[in-house]
């Protein structure tokens, strides 16, 4: 069983730190993307049309999922 093979293996502190940092950055990009989309008077985009705000927010959300996929694939190696 593959699970038994990896069950006893401990992660190094560096790998554990990078995993936690990756999850925090994923959450940050996701939160920032949702904030840009749903906060009408977001200070950085005051005066910008809603279409550009939504496009930038979706770009941040897609990037956060891209980081999540990379994080998962890197952890499986």
Image (cartoon, rainbow, N blue to C red):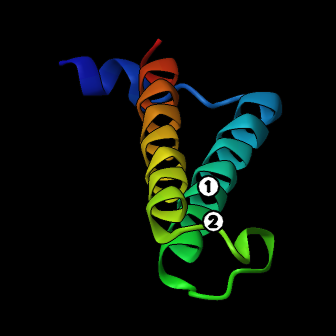
Q: Residue at x 52, y 31 (%)?
A: 71
**Above or below: residue 34 compared with residue 29:** below
Image coordinates of residue 45 in percent, x first then y, are 71, 69
Image coordinates of residue 20 in percent, x first then y, are 69, 49
Give the structural element (helix, strand or loop) at label 1: helix
**Above or below: residue 50 compared with residue 74:** below
- Quarter where residue 9 is shown: top right
- Which of the labelled discs sits on residue 64, or is there none? none
**Above or below: residue 43 compared with residue 26:** below
Asked if the residues shown at circle 1 and circle 2 are in contact, with their CB atoms under 8 angstroms apart, the answer is yes
Q: Which residue is mark 1?
A: 29
Q: Residue at x 58, y 60 (%)?
A: 27
Give the structural element (helix, strand or loop) at label 2: helix
Image coordinates of residue 70 in percent, x first then y, are 49, 25
Horizontally, residue 41 falls left or right of residue 33, namely right
- Which of the labelled discs sits on residue 32, or is there none? 2
Residue closest to the eye, 23 or 67: 67
Residue closest to the eye, 68 or 34: 34
Q: Residue at x 43, y 53 (%)?
A: 58
């Amino acid at each position: 069983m593959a699970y038994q093979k990896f069950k006893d293996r401990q992660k190094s502190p560096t790998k554990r730190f990078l995993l936690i940092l990756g999850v925090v950055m994923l959450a940050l990009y996701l939160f920032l993307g949702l904030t840009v989309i749903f906060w009408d008077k977001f200070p950085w985009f005051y005066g910008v049309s809603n279409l550009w705000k939504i496009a930038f927010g979706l770009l941040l959300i897609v990037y956060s999922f891209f980081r999540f996929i990379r994080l998962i694939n890197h952890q499986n190696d």
